[in-house]
Amino acid sequence: MAVAPPSEPVLIATSVALAVLTVAFYVSRAVAGFLYGVARWHRQAFVLRHTPTAPGYVPLIGHTIALFRAVGNYPCTWDLFAMWATATAPKPARVQIFDRHCVVIADPSTMKRVMATNLKNYQKDLEFSYAPFLEILGTGLVTSGGETWRKMRGHISKALRVEILDDIIAIATRAVERLCVKLDAAKASAAAVDMEQEFRLLTLQVIGEAILSLSPEDSDELFPSLYLPIMDECNARSLSPWRAWIPTREWFAHKARSIHWFPYDRVGVVNASRVRELDDAIISIVRARWRKKQAGEDVPDDVLERVLEQVREDEYGADVETQLCFEIKTFLLAGHETSAAMLTWTLHELSKAPDMMREVKRESDRVFGRTRKGSLPTRDQLASMEYTLAAFKETLRLYSVVPVVTRVAVEDDELGGTRVPAGTTVIMSLQGVHHRADLWPEPLKYDPARFVKADENDEMRDFKFLPFIQGPRNCLGQYLALLEARVVLGTLVRRYAFAPSKAQGKKHTKAIPIAPANGMHFTVS
């Protein structure tokens, strides 16, 4: 017996009922999520009620006004965090940014708990502090977690085996020789040179060749026009978050989302966004390399090759290309910005301290002066430059080029005798630790001697000096960066005398890593 189809009114009624139920479901979920968020916020406020509160608190919006007033001024945002945290250490200082409950810490014992002993309870803060940089970092090592992080860290750890350090010596030597050509010209013309900019270009060339075997010309064509403006905009958004939503010309140039018809350049040709252009360029390099490998052609023995060696043929695809793109951009950020800032500030400090400069020159003469023409210094010889290494470490302590690192507590925990509820953002003020007078006597004085002889009996020494983080998430490229820096600085101080061309030395108030506010200009002789 045939069943009659439902009548049109029944179909309409059923559709309306389903639509109402669907809307009710999502509305109820939204309401439940909102109520859960409100309850969680009030619980955090209740648990933190006895925690010392930083100065400048305003009801409802907390310290938002105080922090925004610091943008572009001195003390800057990072200085405020350091002052607030050191004032209450070892206890955290309570801070509220908009509706976000935070605590700021600046004590080795609490740093150790967050970075090492209770690492699993503190996840990356992707919704707040890292959000402006996700277009660069994506799911790379700095921001990823879980299995993605473990897998890629394993791949990259193998890629950064001992041989790459020998490669870096040769790559850095070629890069600094190219810089010397520029400095010779500046010496002849008595023109001032912005060494901050030169170090940024040099370190980009080094990391571009080490990772991707890019020529200096290719590196200079790709990175200064795309990567550097992207980083500048990401830094600007970190302290001025509204820039991510206002469709200015810079917004379109940075990443115009799905809109690629605006802005036009002066001759009417469409400009793609910088983020898309950079991603396309990197993925095309990865794809071309994979095809060469599959065809059995010779390929360079660089970091990319060593990572691709660990990728199975059945694994390779768009997901792998995207992940490698994020890893490469992470390398660019971590392997270029920190190294450039470290070299810049070290040259600045040594140029003001003739005795220290003479000691660095003495080490450089001993290592580079004994190297036969056409040969390179060995890793052991560079490792003997202990005072030069100490000068770099002191720079990283004094200038804290990465001044803060943030995490979010997954579950309740105790830091410095204070209960920290789940969901709280933990702001680790590395600058605060590095500038504590009880940990570093005369903390604002530049003194490389602090690092010439380390106190082996100091159980907390690793968590008093944190430029590369500590624990399982420490920086994989730190040895590479410090080796590269000794090659570059050792070569330069033997050949040139650097004299500041104008008053300089103020720190940039908005950029991370911390760079000079107005470049670092020298005349060379």
Image (spheres, rainbow, N blue to C red):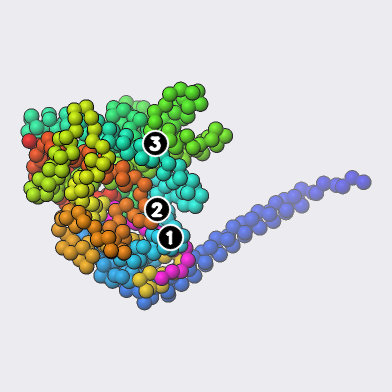
Amino acid identity at mark 2? Arg
Q: Earlier in the sequence, mark 1 or mark 2?
A: 1
The x and y percentages for residue 374 are 22, 27
- The residue that appears at 26% across and 37% down in the rendered structure is 378
- Secondary element under disc 2, as helix, strand or loop, is loop
Q: Label 3: few (<14), some or many (≥20) within 10 Å? A: many
Label 1 close to label 2 by CB (< 8 Å): yes
Q: Looking at this view, is 479 or 330 the one in front?
A: 479
For the record, the magenta segment spans 402-414
Q: CA distance from mark 1 to mark 2?
A: 9 Å
| Disc 3: which residue | 303
- Secondary element under disc 1, as helix, strand or loop, is helix
- Secondary element under disc 3, as helix, strand or loop, is helix
- The residue that appears at 62% across and 59% down in the rendered structure is 25
Q: Label 1: few (<14), some or many (≥20) within 10 Å? A: some
| Disc 1: which residue | 119
Q: Label 2: few (<14), some or many (≥20) within 10 Å? A: some
- The residue that appears at 12% across and 47% down in the rendered structure is 359
The x and y percentages for residue 75 are 21, 60
For this view, does 208 lie left or right of residue 388? Answer: right
The x and y percentages for residue 471 are 38, 56
Amino acid identity at mark 3? Val
Q: Looking at this view, is 391 or 132 the one in front?
A: 391
Q: Is residue 448 visible?
A: yes
Q: CA distance from mark 3 to mark 1?
A: 28 Å
For this view, does 131 lie left or right of residue 442? Answer: right
For this view, does 346 lie left or right of residue 152? Answer: left
Q: Is residue 63 above or below residue 337?
A: below
Q: Is residue 104 visible?
A: no
User: Which disc is residue 473 wearing?
Assistant: 2
